[in-house]
Amino acid sequence: MSAKINIEQDMRLGKFEFFAMNNPIKRFIQKYIEFTIFKKMLTKNNINLVHKTIMDGGCGSGFSTKLIQKEFNPERIIAFDYMPEQIQLAGKQHIGVDFFIGDLTDIKLKDNLCDAVFIFGVIHHIPGWQKALTEVNRVLKPGGCLLLEEPLFRFSWQELESGLEKTQFRIQDQKHFCFSYFHSYLCIKR
Ligand SMILES: C[S@@+](CC[C@H](N)C(=O)[O-])C[C@H]1O[C@@H](n2cnc3c(N)ncnc32)[C@H](O)[C@@H]1O
């Protein structure tokens, strides 16, 4: 099997994970735990994202995009995912966002565009995840923020954190939950 096919298989969700990601329990957890952690971090660090340009990278079914839109009423919201099946579901959110198929390791956006990027559980799917961090850093404005939540998979926390530092992010805040199996980070582009 070629390396390209292996990479694609890693980035796509299997049937079980697709179901696990797109059901009411997961949405409840995302709204009341994952997104709430990010909102508290932003408030604690005096960061206001109202009317800003925000990207939701690996937006899945677009539920996180809907939460972002409701909370911050962004001037512009950019949301994409690698899987066409997820983008099809996202279109059914009916929130007036142009969801598109995209790849975090090759973001089709210009440099220094976004004030903030949200990533909920995507980086651990990407074999070349360091490239994805470099790309996210590129599309953020200097001083812009990355809100990143990941489970302990593919990398150790030390590897992820040194990857963030190497790609010119400063880790400003972090929280661990679910027995430290998940970490949420607020990072600032240097
Ligand atoms: C665990 S799901 C999380 C989806 C969504 N963020 C959420 O919280 O519901 C991981 C998602 O990452 C997407 N993904 C994997 N590799 C990607 C890449 N290189 N670029 C963009 N999305 C990717 C998958 O298609 C999948 O929808």
Image (tube, helix red, strand yellow):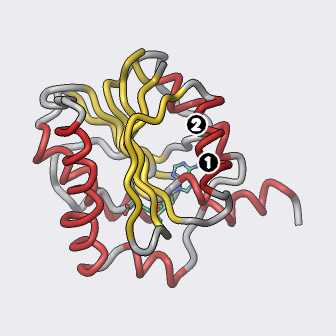
- Vertical arrangement, residue 76 with respect to residue 142, above or below: below
In this orientation, does residue 180 appear?
yes
Q: Which labelled disc corresponds to residue 131?
A: none
Q: Position of residue 23 (x, y in %)?
A: 30, 79
Q: Which residue is painted at 35% across and 37% down in the image?
A: 55
Q: Hey, which quadrant is residue 43 in on the image?
A: top left
Q: Is residue 148 above or below residue 52?
A: below
Residue 28 placement: quadrant: bottom left
Under circle 1, the secondary element is helix
What's the distance in space between the residues labelled 1 and 2, CA to CA?
A: 6 Å
Residue at mark 2: 164
Q: Are marks 1 and 2 in contact (CB under 8 Å)?
A: yes
Q: Position of residue 17 (x, y in %)?
A: 49, 78
Q: Residues within 10 Å of mark 2 (few under 14, many from 20)?
A: many
Relative depth, front residue between 87 and 159: 159
Q: Nearer the viewer, residue 130 or 186?
A: 186
Q: Quadrant of the N terminus?
A: bottom right
Q: Position of residue 38 (x, y in %)?
A: 27, 49
Q: Amino acid at mark 1?
A: Leu
| Label 1 crowd (10 A; few <14 / some 14-19 / many >=20) | some
Give residue 111's position: percent from left, percent from top.
Answer: 48, 16
Secondary element type, mark 2: helix
Say left or right for 95 vs 128: left
Q: Is mark 1 within 8 Å of ligand 1?
A: no
Q: Is residue 184 left or right of residue 37?
A: right
> What amino acid is found at the position of numbered circle 2 in the picture?
Leu
Give the residue displayed 66% in from the left and 40% down from the top. 130
Q: Is residue 119 visible?
A: no
Judge left or right: residue 84 versus residue 130: left
Q: Which disc number belongs to residue 160?
A: 1
